[in-house]
Image (spheres, helix red, strand yellow):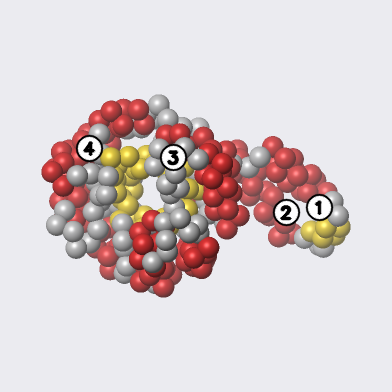
C-alpha cells in the first residue's frame, strides 16, 4: 500500500543526491521515505550536480514511497539555490537541517512551497522545539550534531540525550505531528541498531532515520506492531465493556481501547 501519511513512516533513508547509483538502488529498497540529501553527504564541488540529480530523481519517483529533499541549512551559501531546486522538484516534503526558529521554517516553506520537516540538532532548537513543531510537518532528532554540540563523547551512548529526545517528542505530540529518532552510526552492528530502535519506539517515536540499506529491515520490523501486540490489542477490544475493568491481570479503561484500535489501524495502513 502506498505511504501517504508521514506519521506512518517507519524508516527514513538518507542518501547522497550526488550518487545516481544509490538513487537507483533506493527504488528497490523497502524504506518508507527516501531523503535526497544535498547537505552533509555531498561534497562542495558536487552541490550543483546533486541539485540537478535530486530534481530528476524526484520526477522519476520512488514508487509507493514518500520522498523528500534535505537542503542545506539557513546561513549556508547553498541554502537559497537548494530551496529553488526543491521548489522545482516533485517531492512532497523538504527537510531543513539545524532549524532553530519558527522563522527559519516559515521562510523555507514559503520559498520551497512545500511542508517542512525540521531537524532538531542544536541546544537552541531543543529548547525551542515547541515553537518549531507548531509550524512544521514533522521533527527529526539530529542526534549526531546534537551530541557534538552538547560535548557528548562519540562512544558514550545516548544517556546524555534522553532529555533532548523527550523534549523533541513532547513538542511533536503537543503539535500533533510525527517525530523520528536519529540515525545509528555503526553499520555492521545489527544488535546495537535493534536495541536503539526499540529504545526509540519505547520513547514514542514514529520511526527512525537510517543511513544504510542494511538498516532498513530492522527498523521497519521494530517500528511495526508485532503479531503478539496485535493479538493482545484485539483481545483487549473484545473484552472491553466500558468503564474501568480488569483484563489480563491489569486494569483497563477507554483510553486503552483507543490505544489498541490505533495500533491495529496503523498495522493495516
Q: Do the CB atoms of the residues marked 4 and 1 lie less than 8 Å apart?
A: no
How far apart are labels 2 and 1 at the CA level? 7 Å
Residue 92 location, quadrant? top left
Q: Which residue is mark 3?
A: 187
Say what secondary structure mark 3 lies in: loop
Looking at the image, residue 106 sits to the left or right of residue 253; the answer is left
Q: Mark 2 or 1 closer to N-term?
A: 1
Q: Mark 4 or 2 closer to N-term?
A: 4
Q: Position of residue 169 (x, y in %)?
A: 50, 62
Name above or below for residue 213 compared with residue 121.
above
- Residue at (56% x, 41% y) in the render: 191
Residue 13 location, quadrant? top left
How far apart are labels 4 and 1 at the CA level? 54 Å
Q: Position of residue 147 (x, y in %)?
A: 40, 61
Q: Nearer the viewer, residue 170 or 40?
A: 40
- Residue at (63% x, 49% y) in the render: 262
How far apart are labels 4 and 2 at the CA level? 47 Å
Residue 227 location, quadrant? top right
Q: Which residue is mark 1?
A: 240
Say what secondary structure mark 1 lies in: loop
Q: Mark 3 or 4 closer to N-term?
A: 4
Looking at the image, residue 139 sits to the left or right of residue 202; the answer is left
Q: Nearer the viewer, residue 61 or 18?
A: 18
How far apart are labels 3 and 2 at the CA level? 39 Å
Q: Tell me, for residue 18, which label it has, or none.
A: 4
Looking at the image, residue 70 sits to the left or right of residue 137; the answer is left
Q: Mark 3 or 2 closer to N-term?
A: 3
Q: Position of residue 37 (x, y in %)?
A: 28, 44
Say what secondary structure mark 2 lies in: helix
Q: Do the CB atoms of the residues marked 2 and 1 lie less than 8 Å apart?
A: yes
Q: Which residue is mark 2?
A: 257
Amino acid at each position: 500500500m502506498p505511504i501517504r501519511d508521514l506519521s506512518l513512516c517507519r524508516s527514513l533513508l538518507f542518501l547522497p543526491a550526488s550518487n545516481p547509483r544509490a538513487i537507483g538502488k533506493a527504488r528497490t529498497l523497502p524504506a518508507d521515505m527516501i531523503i535526497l540529501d544535498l547537505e552533509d553527504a555531498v561534497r562542495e564541488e558536487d552541490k550543483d550536480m546533486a541539485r540537478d540529480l535530486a530534481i530528476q530523481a524526484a520526477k522519476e519517483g520512488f514508487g509507493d514511497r514518500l520522498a523528500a529533499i534535505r537542503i542545506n541549512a539557513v546561513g549556508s551559501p547553498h541554502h537559497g539555490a537548494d530551496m529553488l531546486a526543491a521548489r522545482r522538484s516533485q517531492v512532497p516534503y523538504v527537510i531543513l537541517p539545524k532549524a532553530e526558529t519558527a522563522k527559519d521554517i516559515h521562510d523555507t516553506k514559503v520559498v520551497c512551497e512545500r511542508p517542512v520537516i525540521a531537524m532538531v540538532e542544536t541546544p537552541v532548537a531543543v529548547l525551542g522545539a515547541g515553537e518549531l513543531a507548531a509550524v512544521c510537518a514533522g521533527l527529526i532528532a539530529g542526534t549526531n550534531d546534537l551530541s557534538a554540540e552538547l560535548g557528548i563523547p562519540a562512544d558514550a551512548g545516548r544517556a546524555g540525550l534522553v532529555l533532548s529526545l523527550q523534549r523533541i517528542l513532547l513538542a511533536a505530540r503537543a503539535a500533533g505531528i510525527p517525530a523520528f529518532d536519529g540515525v545509528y552510526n555503526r553499520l555492521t552492528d545489527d544488535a546495537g541498531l535493534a536495541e536503539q530502535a526499540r529504545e526509540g519506539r519505547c520513547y514514542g517515536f514514529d520511526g527512525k532515520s537510517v543511513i544504510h540499506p542494511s538498516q532498513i529491515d530492522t527498523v521497519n520490523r521494530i517500528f511495526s506492531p508485532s503479531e503478539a501486540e496485535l493479538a493482545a490489542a484485539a483481545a483487549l477490544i473484545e473484552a472491553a465493556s466500558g468503564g474501568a475493568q480488569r483484563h489480563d491481570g491489569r486494569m483497563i479503561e477507554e483510553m486503552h481501547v483507543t490505544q489498541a484500535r490505533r495500533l491495529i489501524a496503523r498495522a493495516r495502513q
